[in-house]
């Protein structure tokens, strides 16, 4: 959790699918155990149910699984295995 923007900033970026935050943070959804990129097309979770990570590694180490919609597409697979 280093050098991340504030939770409010990241949550706004998530809701707005702000591409400028791609690669800056990933969001873990506590209720589903899945983590996403900020631009994920999936429905946005309540802010109370999310936590933020600065890397996919941190999210994986915290027990989250990568989202099938935004992280396991062919184009993004390399960010899981840098
Ligand atoms: Zn996703």
Image (tube, rainbow, N blue to C red):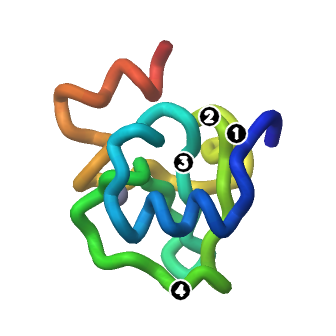
Q: Which residue is mark 3?
A: 26
Q: Which residue is mark 1?
A: 58
How far apart marks 4 and 1 lie (CA) works out to: 21 Å
**Residue 44 sits in which quadrant?**
bottom left
Q: Do labels 3 and 1 touch, CB within 8 Å?
A: yes
Q: Which residue is mark 2?
A: 55
Q: Which residue is mark 4?
A: 46
Q: Is residue 58 left or right of residue 28?
A: right
Rendered location of residue 45, percent (x, y) = 46, 80
How far apart marks 2 and 3 lie (CA) works out to: 6 Å
Farthest-out residue, right: 2
Element marked by disc 4: loop
Q: Do labels 1 and 2 touch, CB within 8 Å?
A: yes
**Residue at x 80% of width, y 42% of height:** 1
Image: 18 above or below 3: below
Label 4 CA crowd tier, 10 Å (few <14, some 14–19, many 20+): few
**Residue at x 30% of width, y 57% of height:** 40
Label 2 CA crowd tier, 10 Å (few <14, some 14–19, many 20+): some
Q: Do labels 3 and 4 touch, CB within 8 Å?
A: no
Element marked by disc 2: loop
């Amino acid at each position: 959790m280093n050098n991340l923007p504030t939770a409010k900033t990241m949550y706004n970026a998530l809701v707005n699918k702000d591409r400028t935050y791609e690669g800056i943070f990933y969001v873990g959804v506590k209720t589903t155990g899945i983590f996403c990129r900020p631009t994920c097309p999936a429905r946005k979770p309540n802010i109370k149910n999310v936590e933020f990570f600065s890397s996919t590694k941190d999210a994986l180490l915290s027990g989250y699984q990568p989202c099938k919609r935004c992280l396991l597409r062919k184009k993004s697979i390399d960010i899981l295995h840098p």
